[in-house]
Amino acid sequence: MSGDTIISLIFKAGLVVKFVLLLLLFFSVVSWAIIIYKQKLLSKIAKETDEFNGAYTGSRDWDSVHESTKNLTLSPLAHLFRTAHSMKDADKDELRRSLRRVEALETSRLEKNLTFLATTGSTAPFIGLFGTVWGIMNSFMGIGRVGNASLAVVAPGIAEALIATAAGLAAAIPAVIAYNYYLSRANMNITMMEDFSIELIEHRVRENAEAQTGTF
């Protein structure tokens, strides 16, 4: 079926089917906007995190690491490090609470908009199915009025209705794939944050113990 034929069927569809298609178009456009945005964001986060890890593992002088990574504004690990670096006089519990707050904020940023992708993936097929059922119902009602059930009479109406199902799947499939992919990358960053927070706390504990030992 050509593109012109599909377009003509859409224009001939009933108001309810047209509304369903517009709603699915909205879900699809927003989903793709989120997909593109998240891809760019997570790529930048990965790049900055690699830069931070290189600076952090290459030097144990926190002042030097802080100076060389202060422009890394997207890396969750850099944010955790700056928090720990700014709390030199804090005790272990205070530092842990502060790092957990940073983790919560960074987790929220990593998972932002993923709910919309999940919603699109789970509801778009049903919205499309509703449009299909409605369109087929109207098609059969038209058959009853005309009194002719030939293929030439039935096919256009059913084709109009099935477009809604196809549109629902077209919106849902990319959203589901993107949701699973970006959720996996977010969880990977969350795990790295948790591990790095433990490392920062242990580093602070060692520093405090060495300082106390040096005073005696």
Image (cartoon, rainbow, N blue to C red):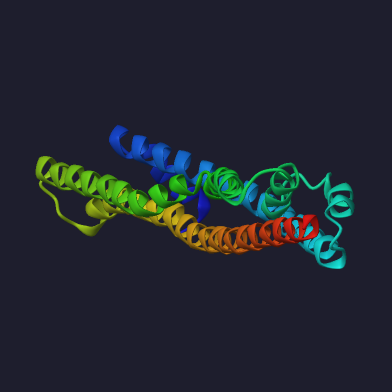
Furthest-bottom residue in view?
57
Relative height, residue 213 to residue 16 (above, below): below
The quarter in which the N terminus is drawn is bottom left
Image x and y of residue 164, in percent: 35, 49
What residue appears at the point 22 percent right and 49 percent down from the top-left corner?
133
Furthest-top residue in view?
15
**Residue 151 falls in which quadrant of the image?**
bottom left
Image x and y of residue 30, in percent: 52, 41
Viewer-proximal residue among 4 and 212: 212
What residue appears at the point 81 percent right and 61 percent down from the top-left corner?
56
Viewer-proximal residue among 118 and 102: 102
Residue 196 placement, left or right of 176: right
How many discs appear?
0
Residue 166 placement, left or right of 77: left
The quarter in which the C terminus is drawn is bottom right
Image x and y of residue 214, in percent: 80, 59
What residue appears at the point 42 percent right and 37 percent down from the top-left corner?
22
**Residue 152 falls in which quadrant of the image?**
bottom left
Image x and y of residue 105, in percent: 57, 42
Viewer-proximal residue among 32 and 150: 32
Residue 216 placement, left or right of 41: right
Residue 141 placement, left or right of 31: left
Viewer-proximal residue among 57 and 117: 57
Relative height, residue 180 to residue 99 (above, below): below
What residue appears at the point 45 percent right and 55 percent down from the top-left corner?
170
